[in-house]
Amino acid sequence: MIEVIVSEDGMTAELFVCPEPEEELNKQVIIDTLKLEGVQAGIDEEAITNLLEKKLFNRNVQVASGKPPVDGQDGYYVYFFDVNAGDGLPRIREDGSVDYSKVIANVSAGELLAEYHPETYGTFGYNVFARALAPVRGKAQRVLRCKHVRRDENLYFAELDGHASVEPNAIIVNNVLDIRGDANYNVGNIKFNGDIHVHGNITGGVTVRAEGSVIVDGVIEDAKVYADLDIIVSRGIHGQGTRKDGVQMEEGNTMVDAKRDLRIKFIDHAFARTDGDIYMDYAIGSVIEAEGKVTAKGRKGIIVGGSTYALLGVEANRLGNDVELFTEINAGYSKKLNAQTLSCRQKAKDLEDELLEMTEIVKVKEYRAKIQELRAQVQVLENEAWMKQIAPVIVHSEICHNVKIMFGETPAPDMNGISQVEIRKINGNVLCKPVGTYSKALLYREPLEIEDKPIHVKIKVLVIDDDVHFLRTMHQLLEKQYQVAVAPSGKVARKYLETNEADIILLDYIMSEENGVEVLKSFRAWDKVKDVPVVFLTGLDDKKKIKECLSLRPAGYIMKPVEKEKLFAKIHAIVSEGED
């Protein structure tokens, strides 16, 4: 007896064989029996052979099986940028460290952003009765909406440089990165290849860099902002200070640096640099450097304290304030241009020194060509500086006391109380005329004229001491009568004297880096300052060391604590002697 048992779903067929005596039982008989019962597909002949050989009787043995259908796969997108950018979650770097900074999916024009893999139909199956079983087709995904993205069949490409993001059923590239709120330590540092618009403040020690412009609706405080185009700040920037004890500090905690223009309401004890112009209402105690023009106009229009360098000139309503905070203005002068010139000169000098010891003719020619090229660059830079020397300082209201106006290395006389004035340097002469009449001054090349005010050039005093409290005291003591500069070490003093002059130097002996004797010896070996009178101003009471100081024949030796009358008398005597 042969019984065929088929499963309810028709996917398997089993045999139950109980052979009768003298019943003929072979493979073909079994197959024919299966077909008589309708089993047409998926017959396993090996299983039948095994049943017969091993006499697997009186039990169910599977001898046929169908093939289930394979359903189709749903369509899906593969993205080639970080779709989770800006989610605020930290990223694990390859070295295992954690990156807590904000992630921005920067993309370039033409870059492949995404690819759509269409849904599939699947594969048909069958059961043991040879009936076809249809698969379930995969679901298609919606075609993505595009903004600044080009679709090419199933591929999506960026149409411009910017940052990419995915929204429901959309892929977007913007060349403006919108920060909705503050950019602070929670957001982290930002670097973007387009414009950045911060709708709040930039704070928390972050650094923001944009290949476009940076627009800030609030303030910048305790942060650094760099832009390849403009920086526009609706309010202003706050810093921790740019000058301390009369010594200019290095870059502080807050600074902005634009390759084009800077437009800002105020700059308060911060650093601002631009290759273009600066437009603001007021600046307090800040270091400002512009390759263009600095304009302070508005309700206040004031520049108070700090240092302002503008290659194309400075215009303000008022310079300085009533409390006589030292304010430095330098027009027609560019630190950047000056550094480039000095760098080219130094490179040419270094090559000339190497040339003296060179014997190979080929290299000699090569070095001479390079030297000639560098000299030509120096000439171009010097010509550019010369063309900018007539950049004006224009003051519509008042110049207060303790305002130092410079044109490169040429100082203008004290102009305390002067108003409605336009000042320029022409062919070495500093010209001063009422605003709007400068064309006449240019025509006649008249010298500086200030009505009813004698020209008084202040004596330049340089104080060198590593005690910042003493430097502050000396600066306050001397600044009303003298033009004062201070330096906390011999190294800083030498750097200052490279581009500035001093009529007298007050020098301490006990200093951490170099003592006073070592500093004075370095001055005596330097042609520029070897004849500048030096007065030791120190609390040293060691006779041996005092003798060492006096052996260098200083102009004077005054013991601390300093008596004002004695110090002023000494300075007056030394300078008067020099004038004789």
Image (cartoon, rainbow, N blue to C red):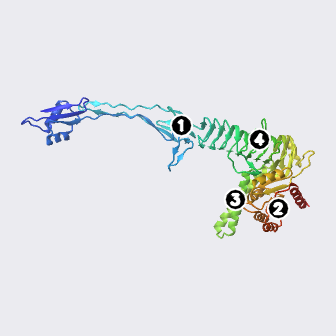
Instruction: Kindly identify the residue that appears in the image at 40 percent across and 34 percent down.
Output: 74
> Of discs 3 and 1, which sits in the foreground?
1
Q: Is residue 230 visible?
A: no
The residue carrying mark 2 is: 534
**Of pointers 3 and 1, the one earlier in the residue sequence:** 1
Q: Is residue 456 left or right of residue 198?
A: right
Give the residue type at disc 2.
Val
Q: Label 2: few (<14), some or many (≥20) within 10 Å?
A: many
The residue carrying mark 1 is: 165
Q: CA distance from mark 3 to mark 2?
A: 41 Å
Give the residue type at disc 1.
Ser
Identify the secondary structure beneath mark 3. Answer: helix
**Of pointers 3 and 4, the one earlier in the residue sequence:** 4
**Of pointers 1 and 4, the one earlier in the residue sequence:** 1
Instruction: Kindly identify the residue that appears in the image at 6 percent across and 36 percent down.
Output: 22
In the rendered image, residue 292, in percent from the top left (x then y), is placed at 74, 45
In the rendered image, residue 110, in percent from the top left (x then y), is placed at 54, 41
Give the residue type at disc 4.
Thr
Q: Is residue 530 visible?
A: yes
Q: For the N terminus, which image quadrant?
A: top left
Give the residue type at disc 3.
Glu
Q: Label 3: few (<14), some or many (≥20) within 10 Å?
A: some
The residue carrying mark 4 is: 295
